[in-house]
Image (cartoon, rainbow, N blue to C red):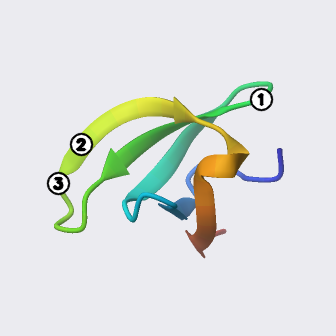
Amino acid sequence: MKRKVFEVVKLKSGDMATIIGIDKDSYKVEIVNKNGKRKDITEISENDIDEVIISK
């Protein structure tokens, strides 16, 4: 687990997500589509992340 809260990441599905919580082996994220519309709030694993877009 090497991500931080509020990082914006690109998922392998092509969507973007903001990390809003970190659990032991997963991340709680808000997923948005390419148009910026919120799709879902769900949990993902490190394997679902393609790259980090914004990090503080």
Q: Residue 14 at x, y = what percent?
A: 39, 65
CB-based contact (under 8 Å), mark 3 and mark 1: no
Q: Secondary structure at mark 1?
A: loop
Whether residue 5 sits left or right of residue 17 in the image: it is: right
Residue placed under numbered mark 1 in the picture? 25
Which residue lies at the image location 51% right of the left edge and 61% below the top edge? 12
Q: Is residue 54 visible?
A: no
What amino acid is at disc 1?
Asp
Which residue lies at the image location 25% right of the left edge and 58% below the top edge? 33
Marks 3 and 1, how far apart at CA:
27 Å
Which residue lies at the image location 77% right of the left edge and 29% below the top edge? 25
Q: Residue 31 at x, y = what percent?
A: 36, 47
CB-based contact (under 8 Å), mark 1 and mark 2: no
Quadrant of the rendering where the C terminus is positioned: bottom right
Residue closest to the eye, 20 or 26: 26
Residue 56, placed above or below residue 21: below
Residue placed under numbered mark 3 in the picture? 37
Residue placed under numbered mark 2 in the picture? 39
Q: Secondary structure at mark 3?
A: loop
Q: Secondary structure at mark 2?
A: strand
CB-based contact (under 8 Å), mark 2 and mark 3: yes
Number of other residues with Cα within 10 Å of mark 3, as a class: few under 14, some 14 to 19, many 20 or more: few
Q: Residue 38 at x, y = what percent?
A: 22, 46
N-term-proximal mark, 3 vs 1: 1
What amino acid is at disc 2?
Lys
What amino acid is at disc 3?
Lys
Residue 41 bears which disc, if any?
none
Marks 2 and 3, how far apart at CA:
6 Å
Quadrant of the rendering where the N terminus is positioned: top right
